[in-house]
Amino acid sequence: MAQSQHQPVECHRCGHNWEVDLSKLGKPNKVIFKNETNLPKETFSLKCPNCHTLNMLDLPLKEK
Ligand SMILES: [Zn+2]
């Protein structure tokens, strides 16, 4: 069964909703190893296809 890798994103500026394919994101902008929950996170910058504003997307770093 194929696992969906799509992450919904909402633009903070124009409210446009779209989906990104997590398998095509490539390298994160940065990886945060410590935060308030002590779980590592990856931060990606995604450009809104509607207004071209950069949106930051935080995802929990998945264990492999
Ligand atoms: Zn937008």
Image (cartoon, rainbow, N blue to C red):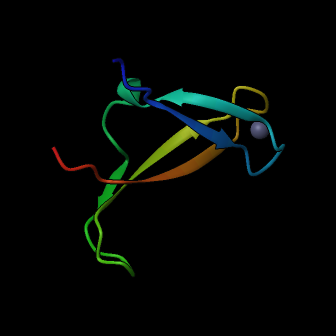
Q: Residue at x 33, y 30 (%)?
A: 26
Measured as percent of width and height from the top left, residue 62 is found at 27, 49
Check the image and name the residue furthest to the front: 1
Check the image and name the residue furthest to the bottom: 36
Q: Residue at x 30, y 37 (%)?
A: 27
Residues 63 and 30: in front is 63
* The C terminus, quarter of image: top left
Check the image and name the residue furthest to the top: 1
Q: Is residue 7 left or right of residue 54?
A: left
Q: Residue at x 25, y 67 (%)?
A: 33
3 up-or-down from 63: above or below = above
Q: Residue at x 68, y 30 (%)?
A: 18
Measured as percent of width and height from the top left, residue 46 is found at 55, 38
Residues 60 and 46: in front is 60
20 up-or-down from 44: above or below = above
Measured as percent of width and height from the top left, residue 2 is found at 36, 18
Measured as percent of width and height from the top left, residue 16 is found at 79, 36
Q: Is residue 26 left or right of residue 8?
A: left
Q: Quadrant of ligand 1?
A: top right
